[in-house]
Image (cartoon, helix red, strand yellow):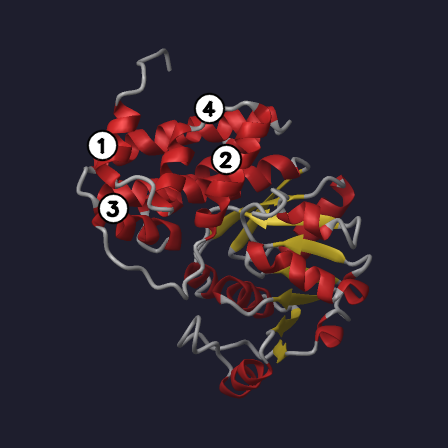
Amino acid sequence: MTISIIGAGAFGTALGIALARDGRDVTLWARNPTAAAHMAQARENTAKLPDIAFPPSLRVTSDMAEACESDILLMSVPMQQLRGVVQSHANALRGKALVACCKGFEVSTGTGPCGILETVSSRVAILTGPSFAHDIARGLPTALTLAAKDADLGEGLQSELGTSTLRLYRTTDTIGAELGGALKNVIAIGCGATIGANLGDSARAALMTRGYAEMLRMARALGADPQTLAGLSGFGDLSLTCMSAGSRNYRFGVALGADEPFDKNITVEGAATASAALTKAKEFGLDMPITQAVDDLIHGRLDITTAVQMLLSRPQKEE
């Protein structure tokens, strides 16, 4: 089967490199024709993944119709841009096997990536879990969750998308997989803020653990299997994102905690997800104090000292 990656950011490019290196015929779609032409000529993505050469079977295009000729499309565009891409190219995408490769909730609707893709196809899955683009592109061992409601679709995609270094674990719980990938970014911002404010590793561990409890709370309310959150798409991704400077969300949190500027050109999915998650929490009557504190920090309603004092002053209870 042929595969196209829709979105030539770092993660999409890394997936394209990994799959092409393993012998797949892969097309990488970039929105910008100039950027696509440059990548095709340089045989690397100098802007997002410099010094990692494209395998011979990876081709680059800015023509969506050409990209949609493939059997499987990996939708690797930022969460808040996904609906726009889907709506703009609905006819070309309709009925295709579509795999979401982004994390979060749409701010305007609270919808996850699978829900958006389901507006044009019933053959939808999500690929998520603990991974950095540069690790995947370099061929370092990585394990991810592949979630599809249709078990047969999931099994087929697992076979087509797994490589010698990219190991995929299958589930039918798309809600749990979406929630884990989305909410861990919010908690990572909070963990980064504790380190940026010099509050220590113990504070980060406490925030990470109680943040995981919030993730489970929402998972149960939305009908996900809590066990999914204990896997790669939940606890695994949370661990990586909350403890590594390779995470954009974590670095954004560090900047917040240290009261330092952050590059506005870097996509921080957790910033938008925090607000969307609070809207969902309100709908289901859920208590999510860490998510609330992170959202308040992002929007300047609290400083880090006040946020910590607020969390520490909450009534003590059973774990």
Proximity of marks 3 and 4: CB atoms separated by less than 8 Å: no
Crowd tier of the residue under label 3, counting other residues whose Cα lies within 10 Å: few below 14, some 14–19, many 20 or above: many
Can I make out residue 87 in this image?
Answer: yes
The tag earlier along the polypeptide, 4 or 2, is 2
Crowd tier of the residue under label 1, counting other residues whose Cα lies within 10 Å: few below 14, some 14–19, many 20 or above: few
The tag earlier along the polypeptide, 1 or 3, is 1
Image quadrant where residue 290 sits: top left
Give the labeled residue for mark 3. Answer: 257
The tag earlier along the polypeptide, 1 or 2, is 1
Instruction: Give the residue type that dot 1 points to.
Output: Ser
Instruction: Give the residue type that dot 2 points to.
Output: Leu
Marker disc for residue 74: none
Give the labeled residue for mark 2. Answer: 278
116 relative to 192 in the view: left or right: right
Crowd tier of the residue under label 4, counting other residues whose Cα lies within 10 Å: few below 14, some 14–19, many 20 or above: some
- SS label for mark 2: helix
Crowd tier of the residue under label 2, counting other residues whose Cα lies within 10 Å: few below 14, some 14–19, many 20 or above: many
Where is residue 298? Give x, y as percent: 37, 46
What is the CA distance from the residue labelled 1 to the residue labelled 3? 16 Å
- SS label for mark 3: helix
Marker disc for residue 287: 4
What is the CA distance from the residue labelled 3 to the residue labelled 2? 21 Å
- Residue depth check, mark 1 versus mark 2: number of the one nearer the observer: 2
Image quadrant where residue 207 sits: top left
Give the labeled residue for mark 1. Answer: 202
